[in-house]
């Protein structure tokens, strides 16, 4: 055994101390690096995934900041965003957690702003990893929550009374994505009359689905929502302009003497129904809503009032019925003669012993209706697709969408077929929405308030004018395929 000298012992201790010091520095550097690692407790997500959870930004925020990066932390317990200030062009971040209504809201953010998004990202990572990762909370109360969250899928209606559409979205594994995104939307929905859950599960399922669709669209459009009244359904602000919107649905006939026609079998069937049958179907609920005279209510008086209508009278009608609405509203039909549009006035619509005047906008009292907003896409497949592209559904489900797009270069629509999972697949809540403006309206709608949808105007001098969103979806079908035998379904819209 070799005996060390005193000097050698001192050298050995010195080297051990130096090694320990180096190891401690390395450990500190590692921990510091780990704190700055945005992926230590999170993952980057797409804008569409982020919007599925946090769609209700305040309108002014959209003009103050440009969103750059989006993150999910601690298994979606927290959300994060890196943004650029539009005034100083520097970068900051914000962290969102759920309040007691399960809504994601701001809970923390930048103390300093940075010259690069990387620096803002690092500061956000340090805050997440040092503070929130140690004790993540399911809820971060804000102190101003009042209304309870709706639980749409806690069944309060007996199964034999449940609507068929509700049963599909509530139970079908293929529609998990739709179910999940509806749950997120419900967190911010205010149930003014206290009947929403009951009606969503039963006979008024489609009407309530249409309201949820309008709710999420209006939020994503950046309008300020102020639902303080039971009627009309929505009150929104666009800067200093106020709009009221009442949801309307075309429902199956409840009159045994005049039952609905079966689904059309061919193109000729569709052409015949568009002339009279469908204008009467649209006319009945619109005329009924007109009798409510919402414009006389104190909070509505002097502001634009919009009727928002959707056709649910049979399972596939939304794929072919939209052109009939324009003819009924304006009392004008367009024909293509020698490649040019020619307008023909319509006096009335008659079907199965029922006759109504054409031209809703020319009826008594209709001057108080500023516009009619229409969509044929507020359907279960729409919510399912939007949930899928937001990452809220199973990877074992495939959705193939096919249909026709508006052609900005000609009269014939463009056929399309897309896998919803394709990286270049795009879809928004505004797709398919079209606003028909009333030429006789006392209070007009500013199209800029609804800038991401199509708009139609009509006058006797100029005919039809306005603008369509390029390549807007006119109609579609969605094939939903699960990775198990005999589990595919084809659904409208």
Image: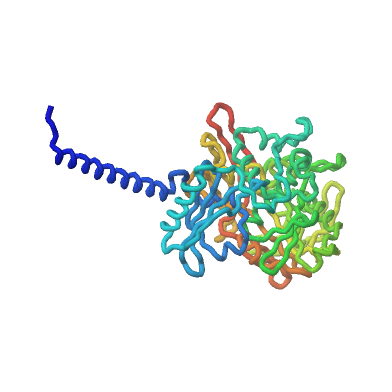
Q: State which quarter of the image contains the N terminus.
A: top left
Rendering coords of residue 315 (x, y %): 70, 41
Q: Is residue 452 above or below residue 145?
A: below
Quick one: 290 or 328, which is closer to the camera? 290
Q: State which quarter of the image contains the C terminus.
A: top right
Quick one: 421 or 387, which is closer to the camera? 387
Give the number of marks.
0
User: Which scheme is used to colour this image of the protein?
Assistant: rainbow
Residue at (60%, 50%) from the top-left corner? 104
Quick one: 14 or 90, which is closer to the camera? 14
Quick one: 184 or 476, which is closer to the camera? 184
Residue 316, image quadrant:
top right
Q: Relative to 440, is 182 on the left or the right? A: left
Residue at (18%, 38%) from the top-left corner? 9
Residue at (52%, 51%) from the top-left corner? 80
Rendering coords of residue 449 (x, y %): 65, 65
Q: Relative to 289, is 380 on the left or the right? A: left
Residue 45 in sight in this render: no
Residue 213 in sight in this render: yes
Residue at (84%, 46%) from the top-left corner? 352
Q: Is residue 10 above or below residue 458?
A: above
Rendering coords of residue 74 (x, y %): 51, 42
**Residue farthest to the bottom, as pictured:** 461
**Residue farthest to the front, as pictured:** 6
Rendering coords of residue 134 (x, y %): 50, 42
């Amino acid at each position: 055994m070799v005996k060390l000298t005193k000097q050698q012992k001192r050298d050995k201790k010195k080297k051990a101390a130096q090694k320990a010091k180096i190891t401690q520095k390395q450990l500190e550097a590692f921990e510091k690096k780990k704190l700055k690692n945005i992926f230590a407790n999170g993952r980057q997500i797409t804008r569409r995934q982020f919007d599925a959870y946090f769609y209700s930004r305040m309108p002014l925020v959209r003009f103050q900041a440009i969103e750059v990066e989006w993150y999910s932390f601690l298994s979606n317990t927290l959300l994060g965003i890196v943004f650029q200030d539009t005034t100083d062009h520097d970068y900051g971040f914000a962290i969102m957690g759920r309040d007691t209504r399960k809504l994601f809201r701001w809970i923390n953010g930048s103390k300093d702003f940075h010259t690069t998004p990387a620096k803002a990202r690092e500061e956000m990572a340090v805050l997440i990893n040092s503070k929130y990762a140690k004790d993540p909370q399911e809820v971060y109360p804000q102190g101003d929550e009042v209304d309870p969250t709706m639980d749409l899928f806690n069944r309060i209606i007996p199964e034999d009374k449940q609507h068929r559409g509700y049963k599909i979205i509530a139970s079908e594994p293929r529609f998990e994505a739709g179910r999940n995104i509806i749950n997120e939307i419900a967190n911010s929905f205010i149930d003014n009359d206290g009947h929403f859950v009951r009606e969503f599960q039963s006979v008024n399922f489609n009407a309530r689905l249409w309201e949820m669709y309008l709710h999420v669209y209006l939020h994503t459009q950046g309008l300020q929502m102020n639902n303080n009244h039971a009627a009309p359904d929505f009150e929104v602000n666009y800067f200093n302009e106020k709009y009221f919107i009442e949801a309307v649905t075309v429902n199956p006939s409840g009159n045994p003497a005049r039952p609905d026609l079966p689904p059309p079998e061919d193109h000729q069937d569709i052409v015949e129904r568009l002339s009279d049958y469908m204008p009467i179907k649209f006319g009945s609920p619109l005329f009924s809503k007109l009798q409510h005279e919402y414009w006389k209510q104190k909070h509505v008086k002097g502001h634009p009032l919009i009727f928002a209508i959707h056709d649910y009278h049979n399972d596939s009608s939304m794929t072919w019925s939209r052109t009939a609405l324009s003819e009924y509203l304006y009392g004008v039909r367009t024909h293509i003669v020698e490649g040019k549009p020619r307008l023909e006035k319509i006096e009335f619509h008659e079907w199965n012993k029922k006759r109504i005047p054409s031209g809703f906008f020319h009826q008594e009292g209709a001057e108080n209706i500023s516009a009619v907003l229409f969509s044929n896409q507020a359907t279960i497949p729409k919510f399912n697709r939007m949930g899928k592209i937001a990452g809220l559904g199973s990877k074992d489900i495939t959705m193939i969408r096919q249909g026709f797009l508006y052609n900005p270069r000609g009269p014939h629509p463009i056929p399309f077929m897309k896998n919803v999972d394709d990286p270049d697949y795009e879809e928004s809540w505004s797709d398919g929405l079209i606003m028909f403006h009333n030429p006789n309206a006392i209070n007009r709608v500013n199209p800029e308030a609804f800038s991401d949808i199509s708009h139609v105007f009509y006058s006797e001098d100029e005919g039809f004018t306005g603008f369509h969103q390029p390549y807007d979806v006119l109609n579609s079908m969605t094939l939903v395929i699960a990775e198990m035998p005999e589990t595919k379904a084809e659904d409208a819209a």
